[in-house]
Image (spheres, grey):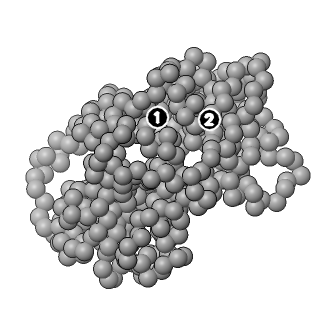
Amino acid sequence: MTDAPLFWRSEDLPRWHAWQRAQWPLTRRAADTARSTVRGVAGALTRRRPTGDGVLRLLLPAGDVHTLVALESFGPTQLAALASPVAALATARPEVAAGVGWVLPAGDAPALPGAVGHREHAATADVLSERLSGLRRVLVAGEYLPAGRAAVRWARERGARVSVVQHGLLAVSTPPVPRDAALYAFTEHDAHWWTQGRTDVQAVAVGSALLEAARRTASHAVADAVPRAAGPGVFLGQLHGAELPRADFARAAQEYVRATGAAYRPHPAERDRLSLAQHEAWRKAGMRIDATAEPLASTAGPVAAVFSTGILEAAQAGRPAWAVHPDPPAWLEGFWERYGMTRWRPGVETEPTPPLASPSADPAAAIAAHLWKETA
């Protein structure tokens, strides 16, 4: 069964960017080209102006900064992967957590662990020179998006270590791990799959803070009058995904929803015109669309998707969960096998997806203990 990443060497990152851009609609590619042209004409920026890293902001302590954590968004997967280890550090060693700074995207940031009293700065050359002189490590989800790309570059310039936390399930088009990095993976299987045995990456299997939170939330919840497994449940949308044709995602959703009566739950990224038009067509055809912003844990009943992390979140919480595709390609079958996902077929009785075993009891604490095992 074929299950190998398309881009696993660090030097494959430009190929990944080219592949990703090729999946964009023509209108988005044209807009991106126009923005790049404008940036080129603008020329080099002065030392007191932003460094070219877009709208990135730095949230820094008053004292020395020994660690930078780069967030690409304030969504649950990023916060679980990158903020929860700092929260564990703040609980165990608050004096060390006080030296952690943050690279932030645009938008209102939530309260971040250990950041009380931190001040926001623009990412200017002066600020980088003055405040990051003692930088020893950066913690990122990768170097393929703006915050992680900038943090990795700043680390290389200062001889600081680069550590990567796996923040989601690894599909065939996952971008590569940066060179000479430490990797905190969900499982040994994921670590080997993602790096293909690269000798420049030190991989540590720790589990997933996101999945552990789902398990703990379920185990601590008060039993409902109606079992959480009851009801038709939801199908998690992925129409925005580039790994499969949009028609494949739509066929899988329609087949499952029509057979089970589940509601279709759009992914937050399904805001483009084609996705919105598909939602409206489904509404007119009688399909229920659950467009609420409530977390998955607030829903009831089984959970299904093509290859969403939500399948494992549901399984960790003790809910029935399945993977769905009427004619899966080889890589998708390998993906399901790697995560122990059970395939749903109409009219076929199958056991739901079991919880994914974790290499550690507390993934966030395991990352914190390994990453900051030295004094700051």
Identify the image quadrant of residue 351.
top right
Q: Is residue 168 left or right of residue 200?
A: right
Q: Is residue 68 visible?
A: yes
Quick check: marks 2 and 1 in contact, CB under 8 Å?
A: no
- Percent from the top left, x then y, of residue 57? 32, 64
Q: Is residue 139 left or right of residue 357?
A: left
| Residue ID at (36%, 40%) | 197
Q: Which residue is mark 1?
A: 171
Q: Which residue is mark 2?
A: 340
Does 67 appear above or below 259? Answer: below
Q: Amino acid at mark 2?
A: Gly
For label 1, the SS is loop
Does 1 appear above or below 215? Answer: above
Q: Is residue 264 visible?
A: no
Q: Is residue 49 left or right of residue 89?
A: left
| Residue ID at (30%, 80%) | 64
First in sequence, mark 2 or 1: give its number. 1
| Residue ID at (55%, 25%) | 333
Q: How far apart, in angstroms, are the residues tagged by discs 2 and 1?
A: 14 Å
| Residue ID at (18%, 61%) | 157
Q: Nearer the viewer, residue 304 or 169?
A: 169
Q: Amino acid at mark 1?
A: Ala
- Percent from the top left, x then y, of residue 275? 52, 31
Res 37 label: none
**Are there few (<14), some (14-19), or many (20+) residues within 10 Å of tag 2?**
some
- Percent from the top left, x then y, of residue 43? 10, 52
Q: Nearer the viewer, residue 22 or 340?
A: 340
Q: Nearer the viewer, residue 109 or 78?
A: 78
For label 2, the SS is loop
